[in-house]
Image: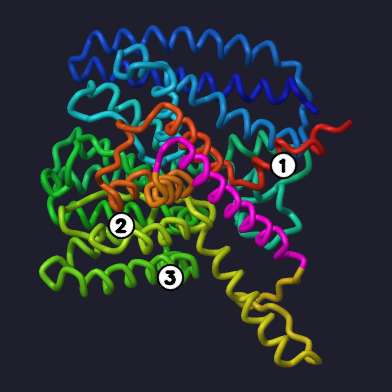
Amino acid sequence: MAVSRIFLWLGFTTLYFAALMFITSFGGLLLGEFQQAQIFFGIACIIGVVGAIVYFTAQNAPTKESTRDALVFLFLFWLLMPIIASLPYVGLGSVDNISTAYFESVSALTTTGASTLVPENISRSLLVWRSFLQFSGGVFTASFAIVIFAAVNLSGTGIHRSVLFTLRKGELFSKLLHIGRVVTLIYSIFALLTFILLTTFGTPAFDAFCLSLSAISTGGLASRSGELANYVSSVGGVVLAFTCLLGAANVALLWEVVRRRSANSVRGFFQNVELRGTFALVAFLTVLGFFYVGHMHVYTLLVEAVYMASSTGFDYHVIGVDILPPSILIAIALIGGSALSTAGGVKIIRILLLMRHLRTDLDRMSHPSRVMPVRFQGQIIEDKAFLSIWMYFFGYTLVFAMGIIALGAAGLDFTHAVAACASALSNMGPLLSATYPELTYDIMSPFTRFVLTVIMLLGRIEVLAAFTVISPSLWRN
């Protein structure tokens, strides 16, 4: 195992977070929060020195790495980087202890959007920081999916494969840096357009900045408590909904739109099977909600259905999709968005592939002598390729069940445990307030939040990758 190579990239990502703190410090100066700016600057200096030491001491690392090295780096990144990201929470005195700070930073970096904090009670500098964390988490999530998960699952169904995945053996980390720049460029363009449109249609500039970063990363954390309708116009609500759709869409398709800027690329984007699946979920929630609240709230139902299907979970108005039965909202959250996106959940492509496989197996049972290959989008997929999807589905279900048991042991009743576990595993923290608003993260015990933190990390790492890293077979020889 190329341990020094792993440390090299951990040092590089540490320097990235130090640079992000410097930017936040500068933002604090612009906002007139000089004390907060000093704290961010001081922490950035310390983290920058530590990151530089780790990075430069590992300069003699091997130039190539294996997929096992990439998996270990992935696991350590999601475990250690939230510790660095949590330091401003502690330094600014916004939380009582380091465990709460770690919960907050994990929630932001995994784009879950669960929080114990009231936005009005914390500094604007910290709101900027967690907005940056959400955006960065979205970039890291998409980049890891394109490079690491695609490389690990070379013999599978290829749900992580894309035009961006062109890889030679041993160049995982160098490719990761290139893909990270591409993803950052794509999300930055759409975040900037969202910011411009939101401010144009009446949203205050600071709120528009935070919401634009949160929407493209499907993070769900807002700059104010309460409903978005209090400070976002109806047109702004549509803008946010469209941005959430982009964040939950396949980033490789977004890259084609940005790169080609042609009608064919836009047409191909909207014809994508996963995006059409998202539209189907939005239509289902909207039509079902119509029977509950009537035509007076169709607009709210539509935009909140997009927020829900994209795993963002923004609450636009008091009366919306949260009027639907909790079981339906939980099911939608667990399905999630597209592969190679910032959305959580099982992913629509996996559900569609499993349904197609199920249909083919049923046909085989009724016609045993016929040869019936599994066809999906004009391609024949071998049966052995579905093994990884079935294993993922089994692992996801196992983590969901174990999470419910652990949360029950922590003191939550069954219904609350199911909703809380689903919100963490699908990386959609606002799901909890949409299903059971009486249960909030700030009233949970430290142990309950610890369990949720672990579940959030498992949901973002992808359960099979997490199981592989902790498997003894990975560490043999």
Tell which of 93 and 449 is nearer to you.
449
Residue 83 lies, in percent from the top left, at 49, 21
Say what secondary structure mark 3 lies in: helix
Residue 62 lies, in percent from the top left, at 79, 24
Q: Which residue is mark 1?
A: 468
Residue 213 lies, in percent from the top left, at 33, 39
Residue at x 65%, y 39% (from the top left corner): 175
Task: Examine the rendered structure and indicate whether residue 193 appears above or below residue 264.
Answer: above
The answer to whether the residue labelled 3 contacts the one labelled 2, judged by CB atoms less than 8 Å apart, is no
Q: Rate crowding at label 1 as few (under 14), some (14 to 19) or many (20 or more) other CA atoms within 10 Å.
A: some
Q: Which residue is mark 2?
A: 242
Q: CA distance from mark 1 to mark 3?
A: 32 Å
Report the side of 190 relative to 230 (left or right).
right
Of tags 1 and 3, the one toward the viewer is 1
Q: Rate crowding at label 2 as few (under 14), some (14 to 19) or many (20 or more) other CA atoms within 10 Å.
A: some
Residue at x 28%, y 51% (from the top left corner): 434
Between discs 2 and 1, the one toward the N terminus:
2
Between discs 3 and 2, the one toward the N terminus:
2
Q: Name the amino acid, label 3.
A: Arg
Q: Name the amino acid, label 2.
A: Phe
Between discs 1 and 3, the one toward the N terminus:
3
- Specify the color scheme: rainbow
User: What segment carries the magenta color?
Assistant: 384-412
* Residue 67 is a magenta residue: no
Q: CA distance from mark 2 to mark 1?
A: 36 Å
